[in-house]
Amino acid sequence: MHPSVPLTNRAEHGRPGSLQRQRLRPLKSPSSVRVQTDKEGSPAILHQRGKRLRVEAVRERWRIDDEWWRDPISREYFALVLEDGRPLTLFRDLTTGGWYGQ
């Protein structure tokens, strides 16, 4: 049974089949990040909260274009490994040009 499911059908206090409420955790809101890119357009250096962090590796890169009939959503995502070994998911909003970390 997956822990992120809001309601589960687990036995609670000896009562089989009773529903138990799980706590939901909100996603972090994206935060603005200043990014320097390499010649291919991939993130190379990040400036965030007064720190300069070098990108060690780009593990994955993908693009999402959605709901064009309402407000355009066009983002290019990067799954990164920073110089200190931490993973970070970063996206560039292709409609505004801004960079954001999640």
Image: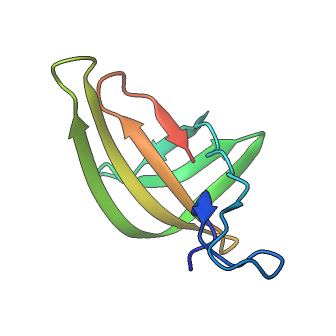
Frontmost residue, 75 versus 25:
25
Left or right for 20, reference 101: right
Q: From the viewer's side, name the closer residue of 28 and 9.
A: 9
Q: Taking 96 as reference, is 24 left or right?
A: right
Residue shown at the point (56%, 45%) measured from the top left: 101
Above or below: residue 19 compared with residue 101: below
Which quadrant of the rendered structure holds the N terminus? Answer: bottom right
Q: Nearer the viewer, residue 6 or 46?
A: 6
Residue at x 32% of width, y 45% of height: 76
The answer to whether 15 is drawn above or below residue 102 in the figure is below
From what the image shows, is residue 10 above or below residue 38?
A: below
Outermost residue on the left side: it is 69
Q: Residue furthest right?
A: 13
Quadrant hosting residue 75: top left
Q: Position of residue 51 (x, y in %)?
A: 75, 47
Judge whether 53 appears above or below 75 on screen: below
In percent of the image, x 30 and y 51: which residue is there?
A: 39
